[in-house]
Amino acid sequence: MELWVALTIAAAFFQNARSAMQQRLKQALGTAGGGVAATFTRFVYAAPFAALFFAASATLQGGEALRAGLSLGSAPAWAGWTALAATAQIGATWALLRSFDFADFTIGTAVSKTEPLLAAAFGITLLGEAPTALSAAGLAL
């Protein structure tokens, strides 16, 4: 088995384990706000790791990733798009945790896995960018 296959399987396992732990955390913290506390905990816990990853990437690449991001537009625009993406991720995490209130863990997780299909639909609708045949096959799989 190639390394990327094993890593992908491990990542899927750990992602489901993380969601299960968040569901339990939500129950422990209470459901006030539909899981806002559990969502907040996830991102506060992850912030130092994200900062460390960003610093390591910038150092190892000599700042190329940051310069590439900034070359897409002005620094305020880049920061704005980054903040929008981060906010959307936090909102999606909250929605996943909230979905557990209406259905069980399995249903909530299954619905969250429609993300690639939704991203493709938004890409087609908003950007006019249709997936390639290989990408469509991956989405179907």
Image (spheres, grey):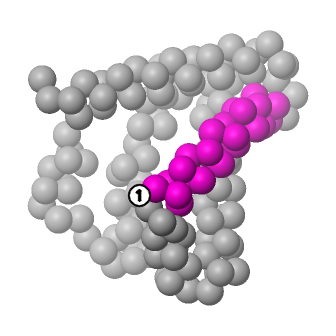
Which kind of residue does numbered mark 1 sit on?
A: Ala
Image quarter of the N terminus: top left
Query: Which residue corresponds to the image point at 60% horizontal and 53% vertical from the top-left?
Result: 55
Up-down relation of residue 96 to residue 126 (above or below): above
Residue 64 percent across, percent down from the top left: 46, 70
User: Is residue 139 shown above or below 71?
Assistant: above
| Image vertical order of residue 93 relative to residue 57, above or below | above
SS category of the residue bearing label 1: helix
Viewer-closest of 43 and 105: 43
Identify which residue is drawn at 56% across, 86% down: 73
Quarter containing the C terminus:
top left
Instruction: Report if residue 43 is visible in the image.
Output: no
**Residue 129 magenta-drawn?**
no
Residue 68 vs 134, above or below: the answer is below
Return the residue found at the far bottom.
Answer: 74
Q: Residue at x 48, y 66 (%)?
A: 62
The magenta span reads 35-60
The answer to whether residue 44 is visible is yes
Name the residue tied to disc 1.
119
Camera-nearest residue between 78 and 112? 78
Towards the viewer: 21 or 123: 21
- Residue 86: x and y in percent read 64, 55
Identified at 76% across, 15% down, the residue is 27
* Magenta segment, prevailing SS (helix, strand or loop): helix
Assess disc 1: are there few (<14), some (14-19) or many (≥20) residues with their C-alpha within 10 Å of its C-alpha. few
The image shows residue 7 at horizontal and vertical percentages of 30, 28
Please tell me in which quadrant of the rendered image residue 99 appears: top right
Task: Using the rendered view, name the quadrant where residue 22 is placed.
Answer: top right
Q: Report x, y in % for residue 133.
A: 12, 61
